[in-house]
Amino acid sequence: MTASLYEKNNRWHVMLSWYMGGKRKQKSVKTGVPIKDNKAKRKAEMEQIKILNEWTNKIIEDVDEELFCEYMKRWLGNIRISIAETTYHSYKNTIDKIIYPYFKEKGIKLHELSKQHIQDFYDWRRAEGGVSGSTIRRHHANIRKALQDAVKDEIIKSNPADKVNLPKKEKFTGAFYTPDELKTLLLAVKGTRLETPVMLAAWFGLRRGEVAGVRWESIDFDSMTLRIDGVVTNIRDGPPSEKEVYRPSAKTEESIRTFPMPIEAADYLRRLKQTQEDNKKLSGNSYSDKWAGFVCIDEMGNLIHLDYISNMFAKTLKRLKLRTIRFHDLRHTNITLLLESGASMKDVQAWAGHKTISTTMDIYAHVQAKSKQRLADLMSGIIGNC
């Protein structure tokens, strides 16, 4: 069962939706909360949870008839208010496009779901979808959590997902450019819409969402610092102008960080700020204010969309016949070059915004191997002639 708020007669109502016997049913329930402001909506959201819980118990009287795929949708609706919107849409995409269709075709009921059913699904994804072990583990995290909540609500007695054999998580190694390759790329994107995103990623090792989320108010030209305290992210299907939102706080506390700006970066950003101000004056009412204050905008004030950054980056490398890497690999390039230049893992952890130093060490183990080889060569030089 899912519950969504809607407006009617200046009051908030809840529309309940569920499936029973393969048929979709709906019911509207009053919250009694008038439409006033955000505080009123928050109260309505609390009523939404209460109503959902009450009607779930009323309507799902015979759980033996509920399909597992329908339960997954109902579970997602139940937890929506307690998770980040981006997380919700990520879960929804996986359930709607992958989990639901597979189990719907199988017709497996929730109370019949076994370890083997789940194992077969994972094996099918590996064989037919060609997905990685890490992707299977993400599927598993969703399914296991949903079934754990079913156990907690006494809908099923035990969690069959606990008994499944999972593939190993592949160790990730990011690609990176050499200094010469990076300089070639930076020269090639000058004067294009990719210039600013590439410059920010190369200078500071930023993620794509962090690049798009940089705002002028987070840049202090007096203290020569740039602060990362938010990201632009995709939250749903649709055109870029509708699916991208700015989240004013980064995913983890470690992601919120401040960088010292090199003189070259500060000079570049000063010129860019002046150019944007000139563009706004020249364009008049045609200039968009939706993303006012953001650094990565085009000549008409529109955000340089996340998909555009990734797609145009790939096309640019192909056109220039440069070695193929992802836009995210500019981040790996930045961090790898810092480490190879003598920066410590602890310093790089803070620079990259990793939650733990083990994350940094796992991702950049290839740099550690080079460092160890240099130490071995150093010792060889010291004692080799003895």
Image: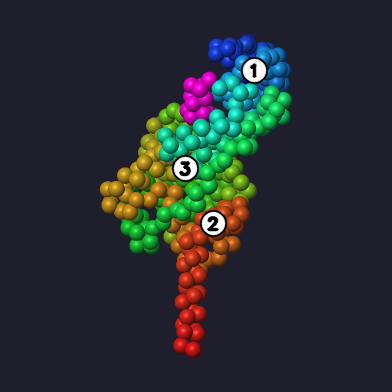
Q: Is residue 204 part of the magenta span, yes or no?
A: no
Q: Is residue 98 part of the magenta span, yes or no?
A: yes
Mark 2 or mark 3, which is nearer to you? 3
Local secondary structure at mark 1:
helix
Q: What residue type is labelled 2?
A: Asp
Local secondary structure at mark 2:
helix
Mark 3 or mark 1, which is nearer to you? 1
Residue to which mark 2 is pinned: 362
Q: What residue type is labelled 3?
A: Ser
Q: Is the magenta stretch mostly helix, strand or loop?
A: helix
Q: Residue 37, can we see it?
A: no
Mark 3 and 1 residues: CB-CB less than 8 Å, in contact?
A: no
| Residue drawn at 51 percent across, 60 percent down | 365
How far apart are the two marked residues, 2 and 1, measured between alpha carbons? 45 Å
Q: Along the polypeptide, which appears first: circle 2 or circle 1? A: 1
Bounds of the magenta span? 95-107
Q: Position of residue 356 (x, y in %)?
A: 61, 54
Residue to which mark 3 is pinned: 132
Q: Along the polypeptide, which appears first: circle 2 or circle 3? A: 3
| Residue drawn at 46 percent across, 88 percent down | 385
Q: Where is residue 114 in the image (x, y as percent from the top left)?
A: 60, 29
**Residue 64, labelled with which disc?**
1
| Residue drawn at 46 percent across, 54 percent down | 173
Q: For this rendering, which residue is in front, 166 or 101?
A: 166
Q: Where is residue 210 in the image (x, y as percent from the top left)?
A: 51, 46
Badge 1 density bin: few <14, some 14–19, many ≥20, Cα 10 Å: few
Badge 3 density bin: few <14, some 14–19, many ≥20, Cα 10 Å: some
Local secondary structure at mark 3:
loop
Q: Which amino acid does label 1 sit on?
A: Asp
